[in-house]
Amino acid sequence: MNQAFREIDRRAFRHDMVDGLTEMAMALFFLVPAITVQNPAFNWMIIFPILAFGPLLKRIRARHIYPRIGYVEPRGEKPGELFRGIALYSLGAAIAVAVGVFVWRGQLTPGLVRQVSPLLASLLFGGGLLYAAGRSGLRRYYLLFGISVALGSGLVFYSAPGRYQSLQIYLLVMAVILFVVGLATLLHFLKTH
């Protein structure tokens, strides 16, 4: 019986992620730090997409998506378990990158940390993608995870002239990829529903 409840939960979560709007919102979320990362005076602007992300998606879905397919509320995670999982994954990714840099270069300097920042960002974002893939069963999140980590890994070897230019490139490229995937998914969704 427990398996049946897990399948119902998976279907509800998948139902909530099937329209591509989450990917498009994440693209906008990546765009703000990509634009502001070179100018620390504007880094506080990242707060706006974080605050607008959830309510904006709910309003758009309530107006345009739910009338087409109905509304199902996915079971929420227990906040303590979710926070613990995010914290442990983030700590593990940071430690893995730090150990990898130390093994690779024999030291851990601020310049090397900036150089591997796209890899760390890709792993941190990848954790969310793996969570979405596991919870919804949608394969596109595994594909996005692979693209994210491959791009972040590749940019480690790119010697950018700016302090965080390789991170900026990662964020911009991922924003474009997420927007294109989200738009294609949304257009397919609207065509079939």
Image (cartoon, rainbow, N blue to C red):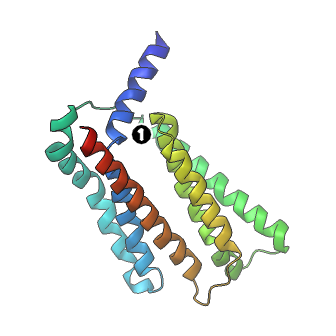
Q: Give the quarter of the image for residue 27.
A: bottom left
Camera sees residue 164: no
Q: Residues within 10 Å of mark 1 (few under 14, many from 20)?
A: few
Vertical position of residue 165 compared to residue 189: above or below: below
- Measured as percent of width and height from the top left, residue 13 is found at 37, 34
The furthest residue to the front: 191
Residue that mark 1 sits on = 79
- Measured as percent of width and height from the top left, residue 125 is found at 52, 56
Is 57 on the left-hand or right-hand side of 87? left
Vertical position of residue 96 compared to residue 141: above or below: below
- Measured as percent of width and height from the top left, residue 173 is found at 49, 70
Is 153 on the left-hand or right-hand side of 86? right
Vertical position of residue 180 compared to residue 133: above or below: below
Say which residue appears at 51% left-offset and 48% top-offset: 129
Check disc 1 and give the amino acid type.
Pro
Find numbered disc 1 in the image and state the secondary structure of the residue it sits on.
Answer: helix
Say which residue appears at 35% left-offset and 29% top-offset: 12
Q: Quadrant of the C terminus?
A: top left
Is 18 on the left-hand or right-hand side of 100? left
- Measured as percent of width and height from the top left, residue 168 is found at 51, 77
Q: Give the quarter of the image for residue 50.
A: bottom left
Say which residue appears at 17% left-offset and 43% top-offset: 62
